[in-house]
Image (cartoon, grey):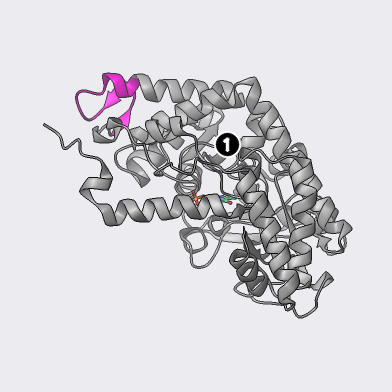
Amino acid sequence: MSDMRPIEEVDPQLSGLIKKEVDRQRSQIHLIASENYISYSMMQASGSVLSNKYSEGYPERRYYEGCQVIDEIENLAIDRAKRLLSAEHANVQPHSGSQANMAAYMAVLEPGDTILGMSLDQGGHLTHGSPVNFSGNLFNFVAYGVDKETEQINIDEVRQLANQHRPKMIVAGYSAYSQFIDWSAFREIADEVGAVFLVDAAHIIGLIAGSAHPNPVPHADIVTATTHKALRGPRGGLILSKEKFAKAIDKAVFPFSQGGAINSQIAAKALCFGQASQAEFKTYSNQIVRNAKVLAGAMDDEGLRVISGGTENHMFLVDLRSIDTELTGKEASQFLDAHGVTLNRNSIPFDPRSPFITSGLRMGTPSVTSAGMMQEQMVLLGKLIVELLRKRIDPYSVNLYTEQVHELADAFPPYPAAFAGHV
Ligand SMILES: Cc1ncc(COP(=O)(O)O)c(C=O)c1O
């Protein structure tokens, strides 16, 4: 008989730490653009007995027996992902967004090939050519950036670099960029130079699923994504592609870069794709964008400059030098975390400070929207954040604003107070 005792009994130290994290998540306002709060049903799928099963391979093509139910679950996740995002092919096995990118690159490229992607200090991700990541080690990345004036992608520069370097792949889709991306212009450039067009939709896939952002799937050869950000699913990755890349993608995930699929996560992905196809998810993802626009607008009204003049998605960056030339992203993010608002420091375009210090902050609204906050709360939050930063050496003001931040957090708890943090 399996051990059916609860974690509180088996390991009070660990269960105490999980509860401590619930309390942290309840007591802070969370503006980290890549995070969200999962539902109880997501925890049920993710923590289920499906974790027990080995199922190397793909539905109906497994290296282990006993995969009949697992096949049904993976097929359900695949069908739902394809329908939700209008994709010809879906691979739901990548363990994370980074693994999805690794498999997608390896499916269509050889080590040493040239990839054109966004420079990391202007919005690209670690897996878009960082020298400390597999991507920068295995491939020859050439970087495009944003225009100094508009802080938006200069598509003419992308075209010029593509013609100059003749990359085998062009990557669009970022970790810190708040404007729409012209998918058809990227498609045209990729066709001009004979490159594969890959969109890394890790951040925006939830908005795309909820029709709050233009869908890159019809334009791109391959779209990689994560399921744990605005999509509100379990931690994990996803690859969508045109049918002609299906075989190569599947081989690059298993057996090339991964072993056994994590079936409990695949079940949770199926749940997530199902939920994201409901009408309420459209409302939710449109509210994420509305909240981001209002939060950015409120900060801008208070004198905190928003990079590229605003946002079209769930996130944006701010330039702290606009309210205090001495204030760094590191100091601001640590100060805000200590006073009830959790977010991250971020380089801004052409940042003179190092990526560890930075002149900017990045913030996003998936979590606060999941907690139920609307425009009214965003106006207040924007004001409180700017006031806290401006008056950070005035204890009276800091106390006053911190109290208001905690009142706001208490009014929109993501989980009930008694919740232990697991199913
Ligand atoms: C654009 C982009 N791609 C890929 C990833 C990697 O996802 P993961 O952290 O699941 O490896 C991220 C993560 O934030 C991202 O922002």
In the image, is 266 to the left or to the right of 57?
A: right
Is residue 76 located in the magenta-colored stretch of the structure?
A: no
What number of labels is visible?
1
Residue 235 position within the rendered picture, expressed as x and y whole percent measured from the top left:
46, 43
Residue segment shown in magenta: 56-71
Is 410 rendered above or below residue 52? Answer: below
Name the spot of residue 415 as percent of width and height, x first. Answer: 51, 41
Residue 60 lies in magenta, yes or no? yes
Horizontal arrangement in the rendering, residue 328 relative to residue 84 (left or right): right
Q: Is residue 48 above or below residue 36?
A: above
Q: Quadrant of residue 83?
A: top right
Where the C terminus falls, by quadrant? top left
Residue in the image at 40% along x and 29% along y: 267
Residue 306 relative to residue 8: left or right:
right
Front residue of 250/296: it is 296
On the rendered image, what quadrant is the N terminus found in?
A: top left
Q: Residue at x 80, y 49 (%)?
A: 379
Amino acid on which disc 1 is placed: Leu
* Residue at the spot 70% in from the left edge and 28% down from the top edge: 283
417 is higher (above) or lower (below) than 116: above
Which residue reaches farthest left? 1
SS of the residue under disc 1: loop
Mark 1 CB lies closer than 8 A to ligand 1: no
**Is residue 149 visible to the viewer in this orientation of the structure?**
yes
Crowd rating for badge 1 (residues with CA inside 10 Å; few <14, some 14–19, many 20+): many
User: From what the image shows, is residue 297 above or below residue 252?
Assistant: below
Q: Nearer the viewer, residue 215 or 300?
A: 300
Residue behind mark 1: 231
Residue 213 in view, yes or no: no
Residue 397: % across, % down: 75, 70
Give percent across and percent down for residue 55. Answer: 27, 31
